[in-house]
Image (cartoon, rainbow, N blue to C red):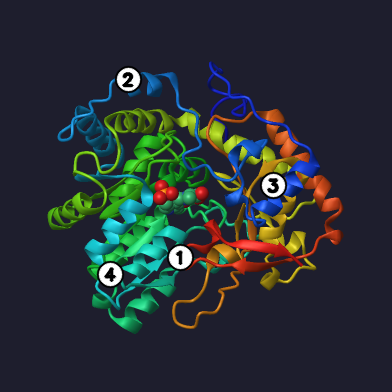
C-alpha cells in the first residue's frame, strides 16, 4: 500500500546544495589502500555518494534550521529541553527523558542502571554498540530473534520478531532474576532493517511482565518500524504512524534512542523510562558521562532540531517516501540478480556478500572486500555488516562468523535523489559481472573494542 500516488517523489524541494567530488579509479585505489581497505577510514571528501550510514547524515528541514537559531544555551533548564521532553512524551509516551550525546550514551546509562555483573541480556539480534555496553557492564548478551532473521532470503514481513520460545527457554534455564532486561531493536539493523510486529511486541511484554523482566526498546528507528506495521500488519492500515509508535512503546518500560537516524538530525540521543528509580539512576550517571540532565551532551539548538525532527519524521508520508527510496534501489538490484537480504529493509539495502563473492571464505571478509570494491569501482561508500562487525566471543576469543555477511547500502534521509540510486545500482551490477576476479582480505590491525570502525586490512 502506498500513501501517495508516487511516494518516491520527494515530499520536499531543495534549497541548498553541497557539491561532491568526482574522482578517478586510480585516485580511489590509492585512497582505499591508505584507508586500510576499511570504508570507515576514508576521508568523506574523497567519496562521491556516501551510503556508509544513515546516522547523523540526514538533511535538516528549514524548520529545523530555523529552530537552531532558537537554541537556549543555558547550562541548566534550557527551554529546548522542555520542548524535547514534551515531544518525546507525546510521541513515545515515556514518563522520564534523559538526554544523551547520541544513542550509545543512552545504552551506557541503561546498561549501568539495570545490569548486575553476570546477568543475561536477551535481544532480537545484537547491535554493535548496544552489546558492547551490555558487556562492559558485566552482562551476557543472548540472541533470541526468530531463526528467519538469519536467513537472507526468508521473506517474513516481520523478521525482527523475538522467538518467544527461545526467550522462555532462557528464562527457564537461568531464572528470571538472572535476566537484567530484554532489548528489542525496532527495527533490527543487522538483520537488514527488519521490523518487529505489534503482536510480537505485545506478546514479549506480557511474558516479560509475568517474570518481572523490564523491556527496553532500542527505538533508534522506531518510526520506520511503526510505518512497516501500518503497511504490513492487519488492523493498523488506518492508524497513523504516530498512533502506532505510541502503542509500540506502551509495550515497553523504557528505551534507548539514537537521535541521529529517524529524527533528521546530525547528533543527539536519549534514554527514556517510566520507572522513577531507574530515571534517577540514569540522571546521576548522565551528569558523570554526558552532561547536565537537561542537556546530556547536546546543545540547546541540537535539542530543538531533534524535537522538530521527531514531529516531522512521524508524519505518515515522510516515512512512505523513505521506505520507497530503499525499495527503488533494492528492486533494481533484485531485477539484475544481485543477492540482497529480503524483504528490503527500511534504512537501506543489504547485499548478501557471501553469495555475491561466493568464492571468498568468511575468514577472508567478503563483505569488507565488497564494500572496498564498490568504493574503488564507483566512489560510492557503503559499510561492512558481517564478520568484522560481529567481532569475537568474549569467552573464547573466536570470531563469530555470523550467518549474515552483508554490505549495507544505507540511505541518509532527504540527501540523495533517484539518479544517485541509479548510479549506485549500476556500479553494483557492474561489479557483480566481474565478481570472479575478486580476492579476499587479511586483517592486519584489530582494535580491542568495536573493531570494524578502525580495523585495517591488506589484499590477499
Ligand atoms: N542502535 C541502533 C539500532 C543503531 O543503528 C545505532 C547506530 C545505535 C543504536 C547507536 O547509536 O550511533 O547514536 O551512538 N547505528 C549507526 C549505524 C552507527 O550506522 O547504523 P549512536
SS for callout 2: loop
Read off the residue under disc 1.
449
- Badge 4: few (under 14), some or many (20 or more) residues near its Cα, within 10 Å? many
Q: Nearer the viewer, residue 436 or 246?
A: 436
- Give the mark toward the camera: 3 or 2: 3
SS for callout 3: helix
For this view, does 19 lie left or right of residue 423? left
Distance in Å between CA atoms under marks 2 and 4: 42 Å
Q: Earlier in the sequence, mark 3 or mark 2?
A: 3
Read off the residue under disc 4.
180
Q: Earlier in the sequence, mark 3 or mark 1?
A: 3
Where does residue 303 sit, x and y in percent of width and height? 30, 33
For this view, does 73 lie left or right of residue 433? left
Where does residue 92 sit, x and y in percent of width and height? 30, 42
SS for callout 4: loop
Does ligand 1 reach within 8 Å of label 2's beta carbon?
A: no
- Badge 1: few (under 14), some or many (20 or more) residues near its Cα, within 10 Å? few
Q: Quadrant of the C terminus?
A: bottom right
Residue at screen point 68% across, 29% down: 418
Where residue 354 is drawn, which disc sits there? none
Residue 75 location, quadrant: top left
For this view, does 169 lie left or right of residue 59? left
Read off the residue under disc 2.
69
Amino acid at each position: 500500500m502506498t500513501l501517495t500516488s508516487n511516494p518516491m517523489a520527494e515530499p520536499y524541494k531543495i534549497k541548498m546544495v553541497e557539491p561532491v567530488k568526482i574522482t578517478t579509479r586510480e585516485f580511489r585505489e590509492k585512497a582505499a589502500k591508505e584507508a586500510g581497505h576499511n570504508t570507515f577510514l576514508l576521508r568523506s571528501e574523497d567519496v562521491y555518494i556516501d551510503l556508509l550510514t544513515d546516522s547523523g547524515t540526514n538533511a535538516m528541514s528549514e524548520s529545523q534550521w530555523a529552530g537552531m537559531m532558537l537554541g537556549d544555551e543555558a547550562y541548566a533548564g534550557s527551554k529546548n529541553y522542555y520542548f524535547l521532553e514534551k515531544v518525546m512524551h507525546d510521541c513515545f509516551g515515556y514518563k522520564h527523558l534523559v538526554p544523551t550525546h547520541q544513542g550509545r550514551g543512552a545504552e551506557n546509562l541503561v546498561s549501568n542502571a539495570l545490569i548486575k555483573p553476570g546477568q543475561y541480556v536477551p535481544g532480537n539480534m545484537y547491535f554493535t554498540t548496544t552489546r558492547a555496553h551490555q558487556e562492559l557492564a558485566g552482562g551476557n548478551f543472548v540472541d533470541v530473534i526468530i531463526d528467519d532473521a538469519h536467513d537472507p532470503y526468508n521473506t517474513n514481513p516481520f523478521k525482527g520478531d523475538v522467538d518467544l520460545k527461545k526467550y522462555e527457554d532462557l528464562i527457564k534455564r537461568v531464572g528470571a532474576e538472572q535476566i537484567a532486561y530484554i532489548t528489542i531493536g525496532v527495527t533490527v539493523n543487522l538483520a537488514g532493517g527488519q521490523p518487529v510486529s505489534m503482536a510480537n511486541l505485545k506478546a514479549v511484554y506480557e511474558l516479560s511482565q509475568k517474570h518481572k523482566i523490564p523491556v527496553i526498546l532500542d527505538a533508534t528507528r522506531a518510526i520506520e518500524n511503526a510505518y512497516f506495521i501500518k503497511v504490513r500488519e492487519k488492523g493498523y492500515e488506518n492508524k497513523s504512524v504516530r498512533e502506532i509508535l505510541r502503542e509500540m512503546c506502551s509495550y515497553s518500560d523504557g528505551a534507548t534512542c539514537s537521535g541521529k537516524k529517524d529524527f533528521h538530525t546530525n547528533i543527539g540521543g536519549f534514554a527514556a523510562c517510566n520507572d522513577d528509580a531507574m530515571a534517577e539512576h540514569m540522571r546521576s550517571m548522565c551528569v558523570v558521562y554526558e552532561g547536565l540532565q537537561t542537556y546530556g551532551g547536546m546543545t540547546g539548538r541540537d535539542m530543538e532540531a531533534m524535537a522538530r525532527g521527531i514531529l516531522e519524521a512521524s508524519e505518515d508520508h515522510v516515512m512512505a517516501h523513505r521506505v520507497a527510496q530503499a525499495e527503488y534501489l533494492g528492486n533494481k538490484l533484485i531485477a539484475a540478480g544481485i543477492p540482497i537480504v529480503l524483504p528490503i529493509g527500511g534504512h537501506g539495502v543489504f547485499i548478501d556478500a557471501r553469495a555475491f563473492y561466493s568464492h571468498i571464505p568468511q575468514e577472508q571478509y567478503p563483505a569488507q572486500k565488497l564494500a572496498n570494491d564498490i568504493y574503488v569501482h564507483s566512489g560510492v561508500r557503503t559499510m561492512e555488516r558481517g564478520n568484522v562487525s560481529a567481532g569475537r566471543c568474549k569467552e573464547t576469543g573466536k570470531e563469530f562468523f555470523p550467518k549474515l555477511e552483508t554490505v549495507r547500502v544505507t540511505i541518509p534521509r532527504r540527501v540523495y535523489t533517484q539518479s544517485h540510486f541509479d548510479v549506485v545500482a549500476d556500479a553494483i551490477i557492474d561489479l557483480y559481472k566481474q565478481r570472479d576476479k575478486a580476492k579476499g582480505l587479511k586483517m592486519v590491525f584489530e582494535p580491542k573494542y568495536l573493531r570494524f570502525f578502525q580495523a585495517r586490512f591488506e589484499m590477499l
